[in-house]
C-alpha cells in the first residue's frame, strides 16, 4: 500500500483515494496491484505511466478510458503546467518489474525522487542527472531535497545476490538434476520474467504457461518474451503458482510422480521472502553465505533461490551515500528507513530551515484542529510482488499531532519535525490566542452541526455571564499563574492556581457538561496539558537516541 503524498504537492504517486484525487496530476510507477488499487474508483485526468504499465493495467481495468493516460518512457522528461508553478518530471528505470520506473520531480517544491518499488544498481543511479550523484566520497553538486524510498529490506541485514547471480543459481540447480523429467518454476509474479527467459534460452526449451489459470503471467510474457511461451502441457519446464499454498501444490506434484513411478519433479521457487522470514535461522556465517550463493532445499521438497526485485539494505546505504539527500521518506511499514545508517547520521533529529520547502509539503499551518498532519509512511508487503508477505501489511501514519487550532499556533522555523518513527512536533514555544475554540465533530454529528451547537452554547453563556478577558500568563510547565474574570453578579480571582490547567477536567464547567448530556452524547475528553505534551516529546527524544 503506497504512501499518500503530502498536501502541499500538486501530484500523487501510486495512490488512488479521495485525498489523492484532489491533486492535479497522477503518476503510476508500475503495474503491481498494491500500486494501482482503487484506480477504477478514484481516478482523474491525467495519469502518467509507461506504455507497458498501462497495457498491463488494462488487463484488470478494461473499462478505463485510454485518454486518461499520458505516456512517459524511461529517459523522457515532461514539463507540466500547474497553477502553483510549472514543474518537470523525468522517468528512470527502477529495475523492479516490466515497465517500472522511478520519477524525478523538479519544481518550486524542491527536487524529489520517488523510487516506487526498486532494485537500485549502479546502472540505475548513473542514469540520474549527474548533478544529483556524488563521486569519490564527495557530495553531489545539487542535493535532492527528498527521496521517497522503497525500504522493503531496510531491516534485513544479509547481503542479497544480484538478479544475475540468482538466475545463475536457478540454472545451476536445474543442471544438477538432469533426471528430473519435469521442472516446475514458481515464477508467476510480475517481475520474474527474466528468470523464465534465461532458463528457456539456456536449455533451448519453451515454457508451458496455462493461459486459463495464469492469465496475468501469460499476458506479461506475451508482452515481454513472447517467444518462450509453450502451449504444450507436456513441456519439461512449467510455471507453477508460487503463492499462496505453494507447499500444498508441491506435495501434490511429488505424490503424483511417486504414484506414477516417475522421477521426482524439480520445484524451484526464486524469491527473497523465504530468506527474509528465515533470517533468524541458527547457523554459522559460512553456512549463511552458502544459503545465499546456491539453491537450498526445504523440508517440503521445494528448492529456494534468493531472487529479489527490491534493494538490499547494503544497496540502499550505498545509494544514499552517493545521492546524499536531505530527507528520506520511507514508503514501507514501520518506518524502515530508520534502520538505515545514513538516516541515523544525517536525517534523524535534524531541524528544518525557515525557508525549507518541507513546510509547504507538511502544510502544518493549515492542519485541521485535532487531526494529524497528512504525512504518512505506508508500504506494500515484505515479499516479492503484491501478494507475498512475511507479516501482515501495516498502515502507520507518521503523526504530527496538533491541539485546538487557535489555542496553539505553530511557527515553522522554530519547530522540530522528523519523518521517522513516531515523529512529533517539538512544542517548546506556545502562543495563546483568545479565539473561540473550534470543534471538529461531536460524536456522530457532522462538524458544522457540532460547531453550531457549541456556538449556541457560547452565546447563551455570554448572555448570562459577561466576562472581561485579561492577559493569561503561564509558567514553563503550562500551569495557569493568573486568571481574572469580571462577572455581573460576582468576581472570581484565581492566583497561582495549579489545579486549573489545560487538560484538566475542571476546565469544563457544569453548563458545558449539561449541554453534552442534553445531546445524549458523552462529554469529550479534555485536551492534554502542556506538561504532558512536553513530557511526551522528551520521552520520544530519549527513545530514539542512538
Image (tube, grey):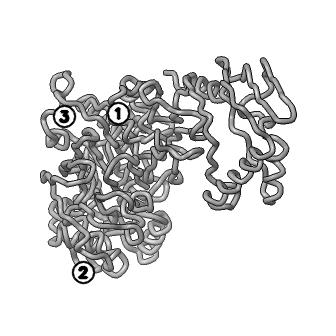
Whether tag 2 and tag 1 are in contact, CB under 8 A, the answer is: no
Q: CA distance from mark 2 to mark 1?
A: 50 Å
Judging from the image, what secondary structure is the residue with disc 1 in? strand
Q: Is residue 308 visible?
A: no
Against 387, residue 408 (above or below) is: above
**Horizontal and vertical percent position of residue 113:** 27, 43
Q: Residue furthest front?
A: 488
Label disc, if present, on residue 327 of the rendered structure: 1
| Comes first in the chain, label 2 or label 3 | 3
Against 222, residue 114 (above or below) is: above
Judging by the rendered image, the residue that carries numbered circle 2 is: 231
**Horizontal arrangement in the rendering, residue 299 relative to residue 65 (left or right):** right
Against 128, residue 218 (above or below) is: below
Label disc, if present, on residue 132 of the rendered structure: 3
Q: CA distance from mark 2 to mark 3?
A: 48 Å
**Horizontal and vertical percent position of residue 367:** 50, 44
Residue at 41%, 24% (x, y): give it: 350
**Horizontal arrangement in the rendering, residue 482 relative to residue 277 (left or right):** right
| Comes first in the chain, label 2 or label 1 | 2
Judging from the image, what secondary structure is the residue with disc 2 in? loop
Residue at 47%, 27% (x, y): give it: 416
**Horizontal arrangement in the rendering, residue 420 relative to residue 328 (left or right):** right
The local crowd at label 1, few if under 14, some if 14 to 19, many if 20 or more residues have their Cα within 10 Å, is many
Residue at 76%, 50% (x, y): give it: 460
Q: CA distance from mark 1 to mark 3?
A: 14 Å
Against 448, residue 469 (above or below) is: above
Amino acid at each position: 500500500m503506497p504512501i499518500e503524498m503530502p498536501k502541499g504537492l500538486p501530484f500523487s504517486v501510486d495512490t488512488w483515494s479521495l485525498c489523492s484525487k484532489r491533486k492535479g496530476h497522477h503518476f503510476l510507477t508500475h503495474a503491481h496491484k498494491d500500486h494501482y488499487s482503487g484506480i477504477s474508483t478514484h481516478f482523474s485526468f491525467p495519469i502518467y505511466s509507461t506504455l507497458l504499465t498501462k497495457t498491463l493495467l488494462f488487463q484488470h481495468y478494461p473499462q478505463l478510458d485510454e485518454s486518461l493516460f499520458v505516456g512517459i518512457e524511461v529517459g523522457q522528461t515532461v514539463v507540466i503546467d500547474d497553477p502553483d508553478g510549472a514543474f518537470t518530471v523525468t522517468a528512470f528505470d527502477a529495475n523492479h518489474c516490466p515497465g517500472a520506473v522511478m520519477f524525478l520531480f523538479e519544481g518550486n517544491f524542491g527536487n524529489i525522487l520517488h523510487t516506487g518499488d526498486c532494485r537500485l544498481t549502479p546502472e540505475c543511479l548513473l542514469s540520474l542527472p549527474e548533478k544529483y550523484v556524488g563521486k569519490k566520497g564527495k557530495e553531489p553538486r545539487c542535493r535532492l531535497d527528498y527521496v521517497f524510498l522503497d525500504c522493503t529490506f531496510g531491516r534485513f541485514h544479509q547481503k542479497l545476490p544480484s538478479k544475475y547471480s540468482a538466475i545463475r543459481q536457478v540454472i545451476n540447480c536445474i543442471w544438477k538434476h538432469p533426471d528430473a523429467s519435469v521442472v516446475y518454476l514458481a515464477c508467476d509474479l510480475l517481475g520474474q520474467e527474466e528468470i523464465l527467459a534465461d532458463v528457456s534460452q539456456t536449455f533451448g526449451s519453451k515454457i508451458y504457461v496455462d493461459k486459463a489459470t495464469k492469465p496475468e503471467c501469460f499476458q506479461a510474457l506475451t508482452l515481454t518474451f513472447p517467444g518462450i511461451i509453450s502451449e504444450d502441457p507436456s513441456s519439461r519446464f512449467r510455471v507453477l503458482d508460487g503463492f499462496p499454498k505453494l507447499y500444498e501444490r508441491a506435495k501434490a506434484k511429488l505424490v503424483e510422480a511417486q504414484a506414477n513411478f516417475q522421477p521426482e519433479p524439480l520445484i524451484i521457487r526464486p524469491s527473497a521472502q523465504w530468506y527474509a522470514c528465515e533470517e533468524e535461522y541458527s547457523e554459522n556465517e559460512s553456512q549463511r553465505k552458502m544459503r545465499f550463493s546456491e539453491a537450498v532445499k526445504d523440508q517440503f521438497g521445494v528448492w529456494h533461490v534468493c531472487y529479489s526485485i527490491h534493494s538490499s539494505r547494503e544497496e540502499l546505504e550505498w545509494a544514499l551515500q552517493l545521492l546524499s539527500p536531505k530527507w528520506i521518506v520511507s514508503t514501507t511499514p514501520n518506518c524502515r528507513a530508520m534502520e538505515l545508517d545514513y538516516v541515523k547520521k544525517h536525517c534523524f533529529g535534524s531541524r528544518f530551515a525557515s525557508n525549507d520547502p518541507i513546510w509547504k509539503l507538511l502544510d502544518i499551518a493549515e492542519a485541521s484542529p485535532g487531526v494529524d498532519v497528512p504525512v504518512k509512511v505506508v508500504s506494500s508487503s515484505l515479499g516479492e510482488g503484491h501478494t507475498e508477505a512475511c507479516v501482515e501489511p501495516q498502515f502507520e501514519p507518521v503523526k504530527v499531532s496538533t491541539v485546538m487550532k487557535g489555542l496553539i499556533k505553530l511557527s515553522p522555523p522554530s519547530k522540530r519535525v522528523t519523518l521517522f518513527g513516531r515523529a512529533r512536533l517539538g512544542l517548546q514555544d506556545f502562543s495563546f490566542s483568545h479565539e473561540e475554540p473550534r470543534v471538529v465533530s461531536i460524536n456522530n454529528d457532522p462538524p458544522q452541526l457540532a460547531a453550531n451547537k457549541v456556538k449556541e452554547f457560547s452565546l447563551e453563556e455570554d448572555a448570562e455571564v459577561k466576562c472581561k478577558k485579561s492577559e493569561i500568563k503561564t509558567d514553563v510547565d503550562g500551569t495557569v499563574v493568573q486568571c481574572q474574570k469580571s462577572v455581573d453578579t460576582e468576581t472570581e480571582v484565581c492566583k497561582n492556581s495549579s489545579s486549573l490547567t489545560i487538560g484538566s477536567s475542571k476546565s469544563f464547567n457544569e453548563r458545558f457538561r449539561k449541554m453534552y448530556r442534553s445531546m445524549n452524547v458523552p462529554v469529550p475528553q479534555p485536551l492534554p496539558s502542556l506538561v504532558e505534551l512536553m513530557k511526551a516529546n522528551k520521552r520520544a527524544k530519549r527513545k530514539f537516541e542512538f
